[in-house]
Image: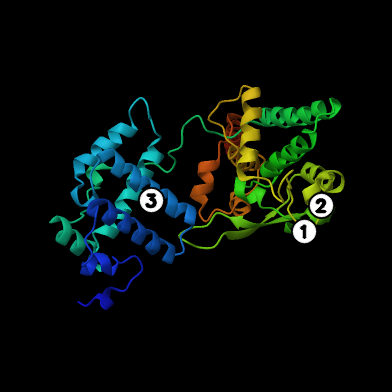
Amino acid sequence: MSGSSWNVPGAAPSLFVVGGTPLLHPEAQAFEAMLAGWRDQQLARSLAKTTVEDRLAAVRRFQRFTNEWPWTWRPQDVEEFTAHLRSDGQDRALSTIRSYQGHVRLFLEYAADPRYQWTTVSERLFGTHPAQVFFEWNTAVHAADYEGRPQRRALTKAELQRLFDYADDQVAAARASGRKGWLTAMRDAVALKAAYAWGLRRREVIKLELADFGRNPHAPEFGDLGVVYVRWGKASKGSAPKRRSVLTVFPWSVKVMQQWLDGYRELFDTAAGSTALWPSERSRQLDMGALSDRFATYRDALGLPAELSLHCLRHSYVTHLIEAGYDPLFVQQQVGHSYASTTSLYTSVSSDFRTRTLRRVLDGTIGRALDATGKEGI
């Protein structure tokens, strides 16, 4: 077929297909051109740049480990690389290992696809071509719905209260001593409470703006804070960020947020002319990693498990609503999960809740048995 027949995003450049100009470093240059083509192919699918960058980094890492090129990779390279990731110095999580394997597998699917002509280029330059080396028998299997570390869980209500009390204490201590950091500590304390109160992911809470709050006509007691309109929900398969509305369920969250809006947000110099809910000292919006760092600092100070992250506040929200008797479908829609099975993975329902549920069922069974016995006696 002619070169024009393969005019697809990510196809090999004419320099490699046709040849002509000698290559000084053919292996390295061909590899970099493959990566560039794969990058273009993924960007053409509207995948997030961060996703593309992570995949490219994984392929580069695999290449450095093997010290070989894609057209000479072998299945045993996969096994040795995986063993390295599981060695004492690495000890990567199963999900991380599978992610690395998946990224490189996708790259080889691209490089071995004749539509992109890299097989032709490799045969001409090196006498061989890329082929898939990641198979079911040498890669990690996705056998369980949840593969996170067992230590990761929701906070208990007592732990959550300790976290919020500690955050408030840091604000009070900094303010009493006249330190400048009291305002940022106040902002972060409110942001942590907001992440829990509306079950938000880190990006969702950081990206909130003043216009993202509204009234819920069915809960007028919450005023202008009856609903949060999430505009930066988790995207999937190259789609735009998903939107959803989250109804306010905790009365205390309205008081906390109203206090922040009325008395403290405007004290930031960068708040003037900005619509961001969480301004910072130097920019209009809080940095993405700053809130995670604050959570980690407070977590360590309280002696909570190191595996707990900012995301556990979202897990806690789901768990506590289920424990309080909220309908699972309502909880699923609040957190924006497409499937109920996803919401169930977030749920760490306490033994207290399970005991109450069991007691209710048993009481009902016993009651029906007594009724039946009474009727027989009559």
Q: Residue 1 placed where, x, y %?
A: 19, 77
Label 2 to label 1, Cα distance in Å?
Answer: 8 Å
Compared to 366, does 201 lie above or below?
Answer: below
Numbered-mark total: 3
Label 1 to label 3, Cα distance in Å?
Answer: 45 Å
Q: Residue 357 placed where, x, y %?
A: 60, 36
Which residue is most to the left? 127
Q: Residue 376 placed where, x, y %?
A: 57, 38
Q: SS of the residue at dot 1? A: loop
Q: Residue 22 placed where, x, y %?
A: 21, 61
Q: SS of the residue at dot 2? A: helix
Left or right: 378 as drawn, with respect to 146: right
Compared to 83, does 262 lie above or below?
Answer: below
Q: Nearer the viewer, residue 158 or 65?
A: 65
Q: Which residue is mark 1?
A: 216
- Whichever of callouts 1 and 3 sits on the residue coming sooner in the sequence is 3
Task: Evaluate whether residue 142 shows in this view.
Answer: no
Q: Are marks 2 and 1 in contact (CB under 8 Å)?
A: yes
Q: Nearer the viewer, residue 313 or 321?
A: 313
Residue 56 tag number:
3
Q: Amino acid at mark 3?
A: Leu
Q: What crowding class fits label 2: few (fewer than 14 Cα within 10 Å), some (14-19), or many (20 or more)?
A: many
Residue 222 tag number:
2
Q: Amino acid at mark 2?
A: Phe
Q: Amino acid at mark 1?
A: Asn
- Whichever of callouts 2 and 1 sits on the residue coming sooner in the sequence is 1
